[in-house]
Amino acid sequence: MDIIVCIKQVPDTTEVKINPETNTLVREGVPSIVNPFDENAIEAALALKEQHGGKVTVITMGPPQAKEALKQAVAMGADEVYLVSDRAFAGSDTWATSYTLAQAIKKIGKYDLILCGKQAIDGDTAQVGPGIAEWLNIPQATFAVKIEVADNKAKVERMLEEENEIVEIPLPAVITVVKQINEPRMPSLKGMMKAKKSEIPTLSLADINGDPEKAGLKGSPTQVVKIFSPPAKGGGEMLTGEPADIAAGVVAKIKERKII
């Protein structure tokens, strides 16, 4: 069973900085990590490989520094990794990103299943996984908390707001996973040694036969006009006493401020 996992290197959430001139994330000099949901996707792929055999290939689109994320995937047990990197990809929104990753997957070739984390913690859109499925014209299932594969089909338990649902889709397919699906394994010493020696192949726009009009800023119908932090709110007021007195006080404050 050949499984491809798409991951993303994201800024550590405690260190997010915005460039006020370009309205983009500042990545230089900012600590980066593998998107946590993507670690769950890697673990899910490795678990399926242990059950069914095959190969796990991990890819990421990003600047050269994203190689560190791929080395972590190797340390966890990935068989092959690819960095999809080119200045032509700069400024990609989720549409252009999913196109580029889909083209890279076509370049890599044979696959039975594509796994992604449900969303990246820096953008929180949850659009790239489904977008890849659309570009490849294959079925998809999102928010998976359990995956079973048999008879060239995937049985997926999806975590919804009120309850879970179980769906069955034919392979090949794209499945996005949530953190509840598993606990990602720690890299082994053997894996870390392998990662240290690994040469990470890089795929450019030309390598994946990409269309320049569909990649990067040119291929992004969504553009960020402005990013800013909301102003800090002033101090509030805590009402104390009996419930009836508190309720009366809240009503008085609302009337005082002419909200009603």
Image (tube, rainbow, N blue to C red):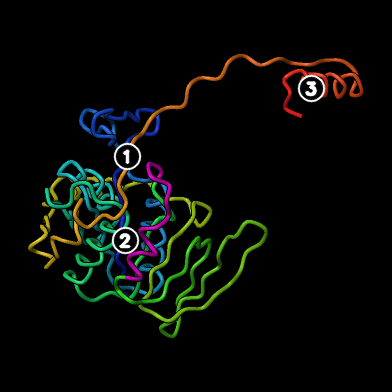
Does residue 128 belong to the magenta stretch? Answer: yes
Which residue is denoted by mark 1 in the rendering?
225
Relative height, residue 130 to residue 94 (above, below): below
| Contact flag, marks 3 and 1 (Cβ < 8 Å) | no
Q: Which element is circle 3 on?
A: helix
Say what amino acid the circle numbered 1 marks: Val
In the rendered image, which quarter contains the C terminus?
Answer: top right
Left/right placement of residue 37 relative to residue 211 reads right
Mark 1 or 2: the one toward you: 1
**Residue 48: image x %, image y %?**
40, 68
> Residue 5 — which label?
2
Q: Could you classify mark 3 by the number of other residues whose Cα lies within 10 Å: few (under 14), some (14-19), or many (20 or more)?
A: few
Q: Could you classify mark 1 by the number of other residues whose Cα lies within 10 Å: few (under 14), some (14-19), or many (20 or more)?
A: few
**Residue 226: image x %, image y %?**
34, 35
Relative height, residue 155 to residue 217 (above, below): below
Q: Which element is circle 2 on?
A: strand
Relative height, residue 191 to residue 252 (above, below): below
**Residue 257: image x %, image y %?**
72, 20
> Residue 255 — which label?
3
Mark 3 or 1: the one toward you: 3
Mark 2–mark 3 distance (CA, rounded to whole Å): 56 Å
| Contact flag, marks 2 and 3 (Cβ < 8 Å) | no
Mark 1–mark 2 distance (CA, rounded to whole Å): 31 Å
- Please report the residue visible at 77 percent of the width from the left and 18 percent of the height from the top: 256
Instruction: Specify the quadrant of the image occupied by residue 10.
Output: top left
Say what amino acid the circle numbered 2 marks: Val
Please state which of residues 46 and 66 is positioned toward the viewer in this rendering.
66
Instruction: Specify the quadrant of the image occupied by residue 96.
Output: bottom left
- In the image, the segment drawn in magenta is 121-134
Instruction: Compare marks 1 and 2 and give the one earlier in the sequence.
Output: 2
Does residue 132 belong to the magenta stretch? Answer: yes
